[in-house]
Image: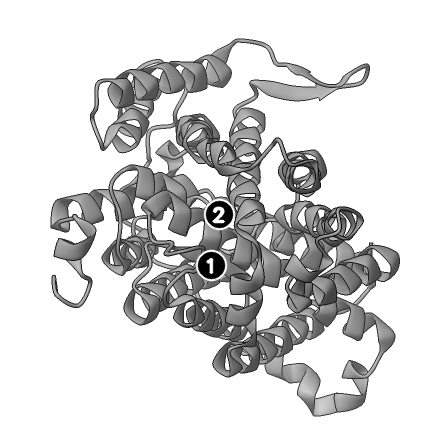
Amino acid sequence: MKKYFQFEELGTNYRREIIGGITTFLAMAYILAVNPNILGMANMDKGAVFTATALAAAIGSILMGLIARFPIALAPGMGLNAFFTFGVVLGMKIPWETALTGVFISGVVFVLLSVSGIREKIINAIPAELKHAVGAGIGLFIAFVGFQGSGIIVDNPDTLLGLGELTGNTLLAIFGIVITVILLTKGIKSGIFFGMVITAVVGGIFGLVSTPEAVVGAAPSLAPIFGAAFEAFTDVSSLFTVDILVVILTFLFVSFFDTAGTLVAVAQQAGLMKNNVLPGAGKGLLADSLAIVSGSILGTSTTTSYVESTSGVAAGARTGFAAIVTGICFILALFFAPLLAVVTSAVTAPALIIVGVLMVASLRLIKWDQFEVAVPAFFTVIMMPLTYSIATGIACGFVFYPITMIMKGKAKEVHPIMYGLFVVFVLYFIFLK
């Protein structure tokens, strides 16, 4: 086991991997509560979606751990589930069964692109400066998610955003941030994990975190949604519409670059990048693709790699063993669902925010004195939190990169794939946005 996951080469051990895997699970466990609520608005059975979410996350994470051996966990993606419900089902009036078919088809296309090596070539063609910008941008993005989810940052009609009321759960989140900062400053590698545990305990003492009414409960039936993705194939003509094409393309685009960004960000955080190339990226992309297919069959929106995996990396995870641990945690969650009541946004916010601090360190590797590099890097970083979309941030930066490089007389230094992506992103903004 140690040899397969290269423990010695990567300087890790079972303890670090297990703690890292559990930390990642705790940081992303909110999806077990959020996904059923969002897809439930699309008239899907919430109990069944809960089970599908847990199983999709377990299968995806274990596949990533076994196939790619990366410390990256997967689950139905935030943003993609919102697009599924509000954009496709409620907005386009497309039945949720047909929407699942769209997810399934996008997954099959991804599998083909991954096997052919096209996805890996695209990721490796991205210049180092933009990869660093992607990592830093995701850091700001997930920190903003943490600030927002905990109520530290709230809506403000006058200034768009503002400081929230420092009471209740918001104070608990701030306490968690302080405790986590102290632990990490003292050199405790599992500071993020222990910070979450301490925050949950303190929250329980002061009545801010609910005490579970039970420990073990039966997993809800998957029957209402399992295999619904295949129902549309009984009437193939229903799939040949402009709306369905837009749905499939959007799922393809967003999940492609969300995954690319996450792989790069987590790999940089874990020190897995070699000369601006991620060894084994193709296997990671294949695992991600297979997770989309399996998730759609189970009955949930697009399954994707989670940036919260960086919290596990920060806690010590370096190999796919941690991803397998996370997958096992999701399986156990099916039967210990009541215990998830303690994993609130106030408990997870400190992990997300501190991981953001760690990830923006990659900004130091960007050549800010070169304007042709600084501009696309800046747009990549800033647009992720401002648009609340990793993919949109990547698109903005990648549109500016060929422009500034050409104007600087460095057109030949731009990889042909980057020119192709320029066209794709421009068309994306014109037709899909």
**Can residue 50 be seen here?**
no
Q: Which one is in front, 426 or 330? A: 426
For badge 2, the amino acid type reads: Ile
- What residue occupies the far top of the structure in this picture? 166
Left or right of 20 on screen, residue 388 = right
Q: What whole-number distance in Å separates the C-alpha atoms at marks 2 and 1? A: 8 Å
Q: Secondary structure at mark 2?
A: helix
Q: Which one is in front, 207 or 63? A: 63
Left or right of 162 on screen, residue 267 = left
Q: Is residue 172 above or below residue 298?
A: above
For badge 1, the amino acid type reads: Thr
> In which image quadrant can residue 63 be found?
bottom left
Q: Which one is in front, 110 or 379? A: 379
- Dot label at residue 31: 2
Q: Position of residue 81 (x, y in %)?
A: 62, 55
- At a point 36% along the width and 61% down the height, the residue shown is 61
**Can residue 237 be seen here?**
yes
- At a point 33% along the width and 46% down the height, the residue shown is 270
- At a point 78% along the width and 73% down the height, the residue shown is 244
Q: Secondary structure at mark 1?
A: helix
Mark 1: give few (<14), some (14-19) or many (20+) Cα within 10 Å: many
